[in-house]
Structures are given as structure tokens and as C-alpha cells.
Amino acid sequence: MNIYNKLIVFASLLYGSLTYAQQTPAQTQTEAIVIEGATAHLGNGTIIENSLIMFEAGTLTFVGDSKMKIARKGKKINATGKHIYPGFIAPTKALGLTEIDAVRASRDEDEIGEYIPHVRSLIAYNTESKVVESMRPNGVLLAQITPQGGDISGTSSIVQLDAWNWEDAAIKVDDGIHLHWPNSFKQGSRRTGDHNTFKPNENYQESIAEILTFIKNSKAYSQTVSKEENAPFKAMQGLFTGSQKLYIYVNKEKEIIDAITLIKNEGIDNIVIVGGYEAYKITDFLKQNNIPVLVQATHNRPQFEDEDYDLPYKLPKLLTDAGILVGIQNASADNFQTRNLPFYAGQVAGQGLDKEMALSLITGNTAKILGIDDKYGTLEVGKSATLFISEGDALDMRTNQLIKAFIDGRDISLETHQTELWKRYMEKYNAE
């Protein structure tokens, strides 16, 4: 066996060992549950002190004050002094598609080709992923599983993070197409020492023309009877009927305006901006076109020397104050960082945004942007009982300590590889 084959075998064994022993998914809710006494954060800007939350068959049946004279039935949970939140939602992530960045065999987030909207992330989603499992103890219970790479990466789907397989996980199938808009300027490289300089991208217009040609051909495909099926064109049809959303990854002011104007001219109206670093400069334009923004991670430095030092931290607040519908998208390429999603929202609260409004950036607002707000994102009667109980403030890493979590009413496990290691070494150090 040559050294290459040995490395492949080692990587496969390592990957297998790291993905073993996922927690068993919870069973369907069979008994009504009553949670009483906690401070309930509804995800829509509202707080209920000393709350009463009841749910049955996976659906919330009562959300209100515990002083209400209403019959309590089923299993009772005393949550006095604790906090209840709707499950946090992580948009545009490759969770379940990538396990170990350094092991190629464990990465399935990118396919060959630049225009591949027909590549469906859902069927590659790995419910046995330990990375996915590690999201739940921080309250991240839902995610939009999204392919990466290329100009049009593929089709995403939205899942809940406690399932036997991708069919069980799916809550919204093929919800959107993901387009990476070209940059009008190119940054220099560190290798040549000019990484702080920007030069016009001579291929910018040509790249746009290629994207628009593909969209035009996709639209024409829907208006003709073709003898042969074209999978990429067929996958784009939901954009023209409005059943799917187009997520455009774009940051600069000029590119945002170009993308929205040109794409809308092709008959696609259901658009979401992902990134939107300079979106605060064109809020009137965004409001006029009814465009929501999924802002990148707030724990970043400014990109340019003449910008406010805290621009990335306060960007969600700037957009929210201007009346834009905003959610937080963790821009890190490392999937494991997604577990820090609640702390990004907490950072925005630290920049002056009302704490409950900051919470909505990863609950109610994100649910609206993804089109799942009819069931998820807020604690309201008739919606899914996807929620958790925390010892303290879930947007603060010091007090985000979950004691219970439910997805569609199912009492899910909060054990992970990390918690097992923590318990093992706490026993060791306590014994010493």
C-alpha cells in the first residue's frame, strides 16, 4: 500500500470515528407539557414574565401569563427563575455537508460547475454529523442547509437538527437558489504585498452578462416545450413563480444595486441579500424594493481604514433602525462557529439594539426571511413547539446553559461529544 492510500484509509477511519454515536433522535410527543414560571422571550420583541407555556402533539396550545386561570394538563415543568426562547435558526450554512475541513472525504458542500442550481443540498445532508449535534446545546435547533461554491451554488432546504435521516429532518424542501454576485473591484494578494489595494475588475460586466444569460435561458425554458429536459433550467423555475427565493451573496453598494435592479428586470422578485456589508448606505433603495438582509457575523473588523471601527458590530442595528428586515448569517467558513449564533445577536444588543429585537435577528426575523414563520421563529399559539429552557440569558455565553430543548414538541437530547468529554474530565479533576 503506497503512502497516498495509507493516508486515505487513515482519513476515512478518522472521519468514521468522529461521526460515530450521534444521539438518538427524540420520539414524537405523546404527553402534553406545561412549562410554568419562566421569563418567556417570544421572538417577536415581546417578553412575558412568569409565563405559562403549554403544548401538545408538537403544537403550542397556550402562551401567556401563569396567573391565567386555565386548566393545566400533562407533564409539568417548574421553570421559575429560568428563561424560555424559540429555537434559534441558522441560515445559509453547510451544516451536515462538511464534517472536517481538512478531510476532503468529509466535505460534500461543493460540486463541479459554476451554474448548478439543480444540485440539491438536502439529499447530501448528514443527520449523523457531530457538528450538527453540537449546535443544539446553544439553542440552534433549525438551519438552512446550503451548498457552497460556483456562481449559482445550488438549492437549499431548511431542516430541524434532530432527525434519523434527511427525510425526517426536512421542514421546507428546496426553498431557495443561491447566487454569488461578482465583485466590481479585485483586492490585491498578500503574496505580492498589495493586499490593501483594490483594482477594477475588468471582467465584472462580462460575469454579469453570463449570469443574466443563464437566467434568461431558464425563463425561456419555462415558456417553451422542450424535447429534452434541462435540469439546471428546470431547477430555476420556482424563482419565476415566486415559490422559491433567490439568495444573492453581495456586499458592496454598487453591486447590491446592480444585482437587485438587474435580477428584478428578469422577473425575479423574491430576493434576499446575504452579506450586505454596505447595505446601510442604501436603505431607502432596499425598502423601496422590499429586500431583507442576512447580515454576516458581527464579530469582525472593518474592511477599510476609513470606516467606523465598530461597523460590523453595529451593522444589524443600522439596518433595523432604518426599517429593513434583518437576520444574522454566520459568515465563517467553519461550520462549528454556527453554534456561536446567539452570541452574535448578543453583540448587536451590546451596540444599543433592544435585547428582544436582537433576539428576533436569529428567531422571528430569520423565520420570516426564510418563509417558515407560519410555524417557527416565535412562541405563539398554533405554531410548532420548537423551543428551549435556559438557566439565564441565552444571548450571553456565560449564562446560555440549556436544561431542556424541544423540536416540534419532542424532548431532544442535549448531549454531544463535547459534553461527554466535559463530564469525563470534570470527574478526573474533581477526583484529584
Image (cartoon, rainbow, N blue to C red):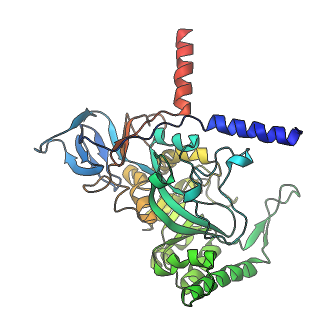
Q: How many marks?
A: 0
> In this orientation, which residue lies closer to the viewer: 189 or 339?
339
- The picture places residue 121, in percent across and down from the top left corner, at 58, 60
Q: Is residue 49 left or right of residue 9?
A: left
Q: Residue at x 37, y 56 (%)?
A: 376
Q: Can residue 227 be seen from the camera position used here?
A: yes
Using residue 61 as the reference point, say whether residue 302 is left or right of it: right
Residue reaching furthest to the top: 432
Return the x and y of residue 16 as percentages of the image width and height.
66, 38
Nearer-the-camera pick, 170 or 227:
227
Q: Quadrant of residue 279?
A: bottom right
Residue shown at 49% from the left, 62% from the top: 318
53 sits left or right of 340 in the view: left
Tell me the quadrant of the picture where the N terminus can be found. Answer: top right
- Compared with 157, 227 (above or below) is below
Is 17 or 188 nearer to us in this picture?
17
Work out whether residue 409 or residue 306 is closer to the camera in this orientation and state it.
409
* Residue 251 visible (yes or no): no
